[in-house]
């Protein structure tokens, strides 16, 4: 049996009895592209990419934040209304 709890108020939601709503949020770094130049077209991008991969392999980090993150929240009807107002 599926157990769903409102992520905002903690109310237990019973499938088939209580309406429940899902909020999905995607967070990612914004990219502000610049115009292409002739130099960009002449550059060997595969070589630059290979160098970047080699550099990343050499760096040992314990935790790296993901560039993009997807979040999911279950809400009861009351908290859904509250979420949409804010």
Image: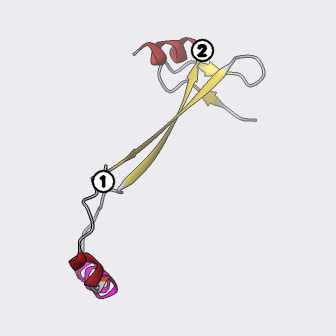
The residue labelled by disc 2 is: 77
Label 1's element?
Answer: loop
Label 2's element?
Answer: helix
**Residue 48 visible somewhere in the drawing:** no
Give the class, few, some or many, for how many residues have Cα within 10 Å of label 1's Cα (few <14, many ≥20).
few
Q: Residue at x 31, y 49 (%)?
A: 30
Query: Residue 23: percent from the left, percent from the top?
Result: 53, 31
In front of the other: 73 or 32: 32
Query: Residue 1: percent from the left, percent from the top?
Result: 76, 35
**Which image quarter: residue 55?**
bottom left
Q: Is residue 56 left or right of residue 20?
A: left
Query: Residue 48: percent from the left, percent from the top?
Result: 26, 83
| Residue 50 magenta-highlighted | yes
Query: Residue 2: percent from the left, percent from the top?
Result: 71, 35
Circles 2 and 1 in contact, beta carbons < 8 Å = no
Q: How many marks?
A: 2
Q: Give the mark toward the camera: 2 or 1.
A: 1
The disc placed on residue 85 is: none
Report the coloring of the rendering: secondary structure
Q: Is residue 2 above or below residue 39?
A: above
The residue labelled by disc 1 is: 31
Q: Is residue 8 above or below residue 48?
A: above
Label 2 and label 1: CA atoms lie apart by: 35 Å
Tell me the magenta residue range.
46-56
Q: Is residue 62 above or below residue 38?
A: above
In front of the other: 3 or 66: 66
Which SS type dominates the magenta stretch? Answer: helix
Q: Residue at x 24, y 77 (%)?
A: 38
Of the numbered discs 2 and 1, the one sitting upstream in the chain is 1
**Residue 73 visible somewhere in the drawing:** yes
């Amino acid at each position: 049996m599926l157990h769903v709890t409102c992520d905002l108020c903690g109310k237990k939601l019973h499938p088939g009895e209580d309406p429940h709503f899902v909020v999905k949020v995607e967070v990612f770094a914004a990219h502000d592209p610049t115009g292409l130049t002739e130099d960009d077209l002449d550059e060997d991008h595969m070589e630059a990419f290979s160098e970047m991969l080699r550099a990343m392999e050499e760096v040992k980090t314990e935790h790296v934040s993901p560039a993009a993150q997807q979040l999911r929240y279950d809400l009861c009807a009351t908290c859904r209304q509250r979420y949409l107002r804010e």
